Image (spheres, rainbow, N blue to C red):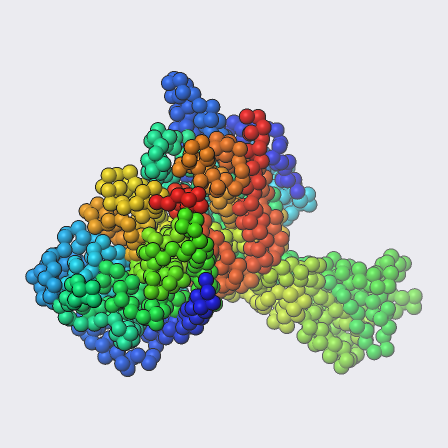
Amino acid sequence: MTTLDFIQIIMYFALLIGLTPVLGNYMSRVFSGQKHFMSPVFGWLEKLIYKFSGINPDEETNWKTYTFSLLAFNAIGLLFVFLLQVSQSYLPLNPAQLPNVSWHSAINTAISFATNTNWQGYSGETTMSYLVQMMGLTVQNFVSAATGIAVLLALIKGLSRRSSATIGNFWTDLTRSTIYVLLPMAILFSIVLVGQGVIQNFHSYQTVHTLQGTEQVLPMGPAASQIAIKQIGTNGGGYFNANSAHPFENPTPFSNFLEMLTILLIPAALTYTYGKMVGSVRQGWTIFSVMLILLLTGLAISLYGEYSGNPVFGQLHLMEGKETRFGITNSVLWSTTTTAASNGSVISMHDSLSPLAGMVAMINIMLGEVIFGGVGAGLYGMIIFVILTVFIAGLMVGRSPEYLGKKVEAFEVQMSIIAVLAPSLVILLFTAWAAVSPYGLSSLNNQGPHGFSEILYAYSSAAGNNGSAFAGLNANTVFYNLTLGIGMLIGRFGIIIPVLAIAGNMARKNITPSSSGTFRTDNGLFSGLLIAVILIVGGLTFFPALSLGPIVEHLLLNHGITF
Amino acid sequence: MSNKQDTSLFRKDLFVQALKDSFIKLNPALLIKNPVIFIVGIGSVLTTITVISGIFSGTFSSFNFQIAVWLWFTVLFANFSEAIAEGRGKAQAESLKKNRTQTLARKMVGNKEEKVAAPELKKGDVVVCEAGDIIPSDGEVIDGIASVDESAITGESAPVIRESGGDRSAVTGGTKVISDCILIRITSEPGDTFIDRMIALVEGAQRQKTPNEIALSILLSGLSIIFLLAVVTLPAFFGYSLSASGLPQSQNLTIPVLIALLVCLIPTTIGGLLSAIGISGMDRLLQRNVIATSGRAIEAAGDVDVLLLDKTGTITLGNRMATDFFPADEVRETDLAHAAQLSSLSDETPEGRSIVILAKEKFGWRGHDIHQKSVVFIPFTAQSKMSGVDITDGKGIVHQIRKGSSEAIRSFVLNGNGFFPKKMEEKVSELARMGATPLVVAEDNKVLGVIQLKDIVKGGIKQRFAQLRTMGIRTVMITGDNVLTAAAIAAEAGVDDFMAEATPEDKLMRIREEQANGHLVGMIGDGTNDAPALAQADIGIAMNSGTQAAREAGNMVDLDSNPTKLIEVVEVGKQLLMTRGALTTFSIANDVAKYFAIIPAIAVFLYAKGNDVGPLSALNVMHLGSPESAILSAVIFNAIIIVMLIPLALKGVSYVPMSANKALIKNLFIYGLGGVIAPFAGIKLIDLIINLFA
């Protein structure tokens, strides 16, 4: 690594830490209904939406109604995206005259975008019309991210309210996070990206003559608008198959830096918003620090894995599959941050990472996408771990466990366990199925532990709603489209429903004022404890599987064997 | 105390009974109450079936046999921990029960007396008890007054007064009337007395899980399911790896190995010890002579963060004591003290006695010379509000020495044409302001001076409150005194807050207010008028000497009737919760080492070249002897650690009052870090021993 690499990394994290309170503070004003500088700009739109859809923004609902609204909204969105895909050949804005998408791929993609996973079993430029990309996928990029924020907001209300039956209004939370947070940021970012050379047009695909004298078809389309939100909303579904490795998606080192920064921006800032809204900024920073430590540890291991070279090829840094324009450090920084943040975008093939870096990417996902994680989703997932930590260790101070003054009781423990169990179930059971069935194995391009990693990664990515692929696995088959689709649904709603149930139950409880007898959740000791619980409860489950995948591959690599 | 039993782990009869019970508890209907251990039970059965079928098919494996044996031991050890805790609790409670004789009760039917067996008495029956009778069941005195020997349940030999009406009307079955005759209305159904309930609480069958225990069981079951998933999917991953290594599927993981891995990963340590911890919490309360009516109450005691404490008996010694003499001008202190002592000799109240004692201590006198004088004692009356003596001296002149409230003495001296000195007037109001009680002494028409009577704050109570403060518990002193007096004592005792001139309604209001603000309130009380407050409080401890109403309202009864007990109860509750947390943390932390023992062992041949060991052997950081010994060591460690931790589960983790943060650091260091390191050392040691004999 060169000094330049270090400078880039330091700059990246300094900016991330610096922007966290700025954006976090703004969001807390937005979500608590205070006046802010965007209200004059988009206030009319908010009011119009409420008026048009007959919503009373001040009407509060209990958790069951909140959950029902959320599920209904997502179900309708999912169905809409599915129907758009299977009928795109009859619809406008399809200059490349792409045929209708196959039913199983359409189901997979609809689920994928509605669950903020953005797993792509298809390749964008040869499958989706402009209409599907804009009205289906881009819209879902916004609202799936907003859904994540809404769930977090419900949880915040549950934790900070005293003896309340309600946890807010889903439609209000959804509307505010979309039009005051996601929309302005996406507009601003798209304009910057267009300035850097990302395309945004409705032209039909261009055929050009290359210098070698051959013909090449250049795909066109409204890319910038989708790329902005795919980064900001931790979606990651690329406009083109090559995702952010495509020069039309990510043309310059500056655009690359910005795209990396925007991956973590909202998830990081939400920790500050959280602290602000539960009444203690320290609580937010504590969670931020845990996320940052886990991220930096993963990054360090990945960089070690890449820069320590490959014994088979001597001490070369392997560039195969990496983003050759931006180098290894950027490739690794991208792979670590995207897997941590449940953002499925890629600039390098994770399949081509060293086994250690590949394992870090996988662990980031398996831990439940809580290292910053998806927009909203990362933080509410992290709070599930906080609740478990409080419950396991909190007893050791001699009081029944409480978090933010709320008692953690049987119901919360039960729901937290379901939330941890849901993605584990998907990852382990489906991987086991695929690893022994012919329809699972026939899609593999690699053998040995590497092939195993490909399957394990795919289901982890689905369950964690990450969406990136290890590559090397042909996932556009009925088996993979359906099992991954089910995995994405369980991984998304198997957590959202328990989280909302916790929010509802917590809201009803009174708040015990803190004293010196209270188990503190806002100091370094708690950070350490939380990390330990995440690694042991979240990680140990996968230790046997990881041993048979990346760990054994790493050990074999040291013996000079590759797959 | 008489109830302190020898309940050490090694008392032979308890030990033998617990061993028997360990096997009885193998009954699946009982075992399923503990899901984690139930899983181990199923594993033991499956492994045993594998071993037996191996015998018949001629493929007997001694490794499988050993795994099976140790799995059974794991279940038995867990059962044993519960059985020994129950045994100790029962022994403790039986010693209370033993005192309840089966003698005949004298039941009143109309005006006639009828002899019935004590267990046949129903709620509402009225019985009569005379000197020498054993009180047949819990009840309330409805007529008469008697002294009762309660040593059978409290261990306190001094008899106590029980009388109808008032706050000392409750009697407990098994105690003995030693004077007079009382009518008692029975207040509990047969088999439902306090002691019966307590026995039921320590007995596993009737024992209900407390809310925190339920939550913890859910966590443990949830973790077990997660690890079950990790284990059942392993053969598929393994099968893939076998084909990738070019090995036959017949080398896939066997059922005993999978079960061994599962049992090592699921939280068997805390799962096995959980009920023992709960029962022993109950037991520790009983050792302190407190009977809890529910397990929930003990848990709540740990959570209490506001304590309402009665001033009298808890904070102060209970009676006002003379502490100083303030003589008037031109009066020597010795003269004042002498007069004060004389006037108090006939005063049998604790205050009066304390004046005699103060004079004795200050000047070394003994009140022995009074018989040589002609002395007439004037007792205290409600009208005069004074007491004293009339002494006829050698000249035949009668000197009237009086002691009383400032008003009473003022009119006494004014009647004798004397005057009340301004300086003394000031002293009286100064003392009152400081919260003390001033008594004025006069001889004939001359005021001699003022005696200061003060509440004496118990020694060490200030430190105790300081400790409570570091534990995050706020103390509120409750007193009927006026605000000035209350404030002075509150300051001296170091309580955080006080309620002066408190009525029972005030107490109730205060508790509701604290609870509305999210606090959990503990209080201790005795009177009928305390009953609403006791019922409202999260922890209400009724004194055994109190009324039946108070005892029914509270969720604990203190047999010693010692108000300070509240603090001890809180500590028992905290210790119980800490023990649970510590062992849960320990149990989960153990998993790290077990993975490092088992994973390299089962994967030793994967991707191996020639006769070399496979690359995953690099994870064998403990350098365990062989794959078999590695797995066996982990299973053995897992079983033995349960037995080794039984004493800890029964005694509770060492408890010192300290802040939550300090307690956490300490316990994390011991049980968290210790939980990660201990199994590495333990498994390595067991592996060395196994390989020694192999």
**Location of residue B51 by image quarter:** top left
* Residue at 83% in and 78% down: B329
Image coordinates of residue B26 in percent, x first then y, are 45, 29
In the rendered image, the residue lying farthest to the right is: B394
Nearer the observer, A96 or B448 = A96
Q: Nearer the viewer, residue A300 or B17?
A: A300
- Residue sitting at 42 percent across and 36 percent down? B608
Q: Quadrant of residue B459?
A: bottom right
Question: Is any atom of residue B24 visible in this view?
Answer: no
Q: Position of residue B106 (x, y in %)?
A: 54, 36
Q: Nearer the viewer, residue B429 or A36?
A: A36
Give percent across and percent down for residue B203.
49, 37
- Image quadrant holding the C terminus of chain B, namely top right
Give the number of marks. Answer: 0
Outermost front residue: A212
Q: Is residue B50 among what the camera can see? A: yes
Above or below, B133 relative to A160? above
- Picture residue at 53% right of the left edge, 36% below the top: B624
**Residue found 44% across the figure and 26% down from its top:** B64
**Left or right for B586, reference B160:** left
Left or right of B91? Residue B232 is left
Q: Nearer the viewer, residue B134 or B265?
A: B265
Q: Position of residue A480 (x, y in %)?
A: 23, 47
In the picture, which quadrant includes the N terminus of chain B?
A: top right
Establish if B481 lies above or below B228: below
Which residue, as the protein is rendered here, is positioned at the far left? A90
Question: B66 above or below A171?
Answer: above
